[in-house]
Amino acid sequence: MNKHEKMHAVLKEKFGFDDFRPGQAEIISALLENKNALGMLPTGGGKSLIYQMMGYLRPGTVVIVTPLLSLMQDQVSRFNYMGEKSVIALSSLMDAQEKYSVLHHLNNYRFVLISPEMLNQEAVLKAFANININTFVIDEAHTILSWGPDFRPDYLDLPLIHEQLGFPPLLLLTATATKAMQADLMQRFNVPMEQWYVYAQSVDRPNIYLHNEVLDTNADKDDRLTTLVKQIPGAGIVYVSSRKLANTLAEQLKQTTGRHVAAYHGGLDNVARYRLQQQFMQNDLDVIVATSAFGMGIDKDDIRFIIHYHLSQDLASYMQEIGRAGRDNQAALAVLLYVPGDERIQYHLLDASLPTDTMLAQYMDKQIDAASIGVERARLIDYYIAKHLGLEQMQSLFKERRIVRSQALQSMVNYARQPEDLRNYLLQYFDDAPTSLDFESVGPAAFNLNVVGLPAQLAAKNSLPAQHWPDILKQLFK
DNA sequence: CGAGAGTACTATAAAGTACTCTCGGTGCATTATT
């Protein structure tokens, strides 16, 4: 049996599929040729099947680095559902004894899920260095760039960890990365460029209609939001940048629209978060008003609309967030509501997450303690101290980071001010091939109103040519 | 930076003004206490 016959046999036997989805076979094939791979596939594009397949195509343990404990749990459940028992999530939820036992029998597992923080512990890393690693997978690999420098620094150590594990075959997976981000990711790993295989699908999601609106005041924005949530049927997410506002808006929308609305943010305990996700999945909730905490791992394919009440921190995040809509390939809406000045909250958040020069100097001089500069900031500084960075190096590092993030935010603001041609703007930002394919040009059938589930009073206009869509939406938005 | 809540002031009293204060995202892991 040659390589491709074997791949198809495993696909059929373990997953029950006859054909691969775009990119899957190419990436698996490259990994089997001992290349390292970067796979950029849209959310729901079947990324996890790639590393699942690898577990059955060659010996050794597939190690999957995952950013969230909840994602690990989901994966374990999914593995168990398909009858795979040789899988474990190694996390802080495990007690010390159990952890010890797992680390001493790592070879027994076909799949191990782990966070970068856990993997970066000395004893843990040693245990992994002693086993045969089938593939070293980094899921949501863009987090190396977005979270590494100022939020979860252990992400920055993944290239070093990869080296300490003896350069096992590497697989980076993400749904959203510009060309520059892809290059940045690959260059961080100590691997010759010719050993990389890149499969990057377009970030374009033609079934998601993009619409931006600039409003004068917050009151106008509230009105708009209410109208939209009232009128667009189906499940949706409203993104905001503050927990408090998420609570307030959820309450308001519940009363003004009569729909089932709830708030979701990092301030909720795990039980509440889990419950909300389940209710949303089962359509017991229509709309979630959320901060950026909501999204990763939300595996609901019929989300019809994403409304941004605030800006995302950059366009990559924005793409991630709107990309959660319309995974069933039915038409969906992404609406960005912008009041000039909205960016200030994002500027503040990025500013507040990084230590100032004085803070840095005083903390390193031990003139102030962790509590007075904030424990999060202190941990970040401690990380860089452990890497033997001096004061000035850190100051310039954070300065650079401020600049990079400000520029990324500025692109988000520029986008928010665009009245039209949004798709091409985004695609150009991602260095994607510009396309004429748009909501308007896909043809009416794809966006049949009944399929979209838009309001009944518009259903009569079902037969309108699709070019009239913007007008219809304008009316809807009045 | 600025929105929104809270407070003080004015002085027929009430409601308006001006001021101060507080708060604003994403999560891993771990430790020492009630």
Image: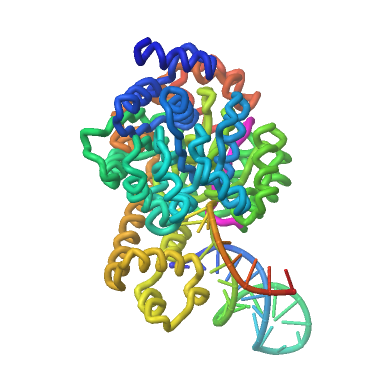
Which is nearer the eye, A478 or A381?
A: A381
Which residue is located at x 37 percent, y 53 percent? Answer: A156
Q: Where the N terminus of chain A falls, by quadrant?
A: top left
Tell me if residue A207 can be seen.
no
Determine whether, in the image, residue A84 is placed left or right of residue A354.
right
Which residue is located at x 32 percent, y 55 percent? Answer: A404
Query: What is the magenta range?
Result: A233-243
Which image quarter: residue A386? Answer: bottom left
Which image quarter: residue B25? Answer: bottom right
Which is nearer the eye, A414 or A167?
A: A167
Which is nearer the eye, A269 or A262?
A: A269
Q: Residue A36 placed where, x, y %?
A: 31, 34
Q: Residue A384 placed where, x, y %?
A: 36, 65
Which residue is located at x 33 percent, y 30 percent? Answer: A200
Is A255 covered by the magenta stretch? no
Q: Is residue A206 above or below residue A265?
A: above
Q: Residue A97 placed where, x, y %?
A: 61, 51
Q: Where the C terminus of chain A falls, by quadrant?
A: top right
Determine whether, in the image, residue A16 is placed left or right of residue A200.
right
Q: How many marks?
A: 0
Which image quarter: residue B15? Answer: bottom right
Which is nearer the eye, A193 or A6?
A: A6
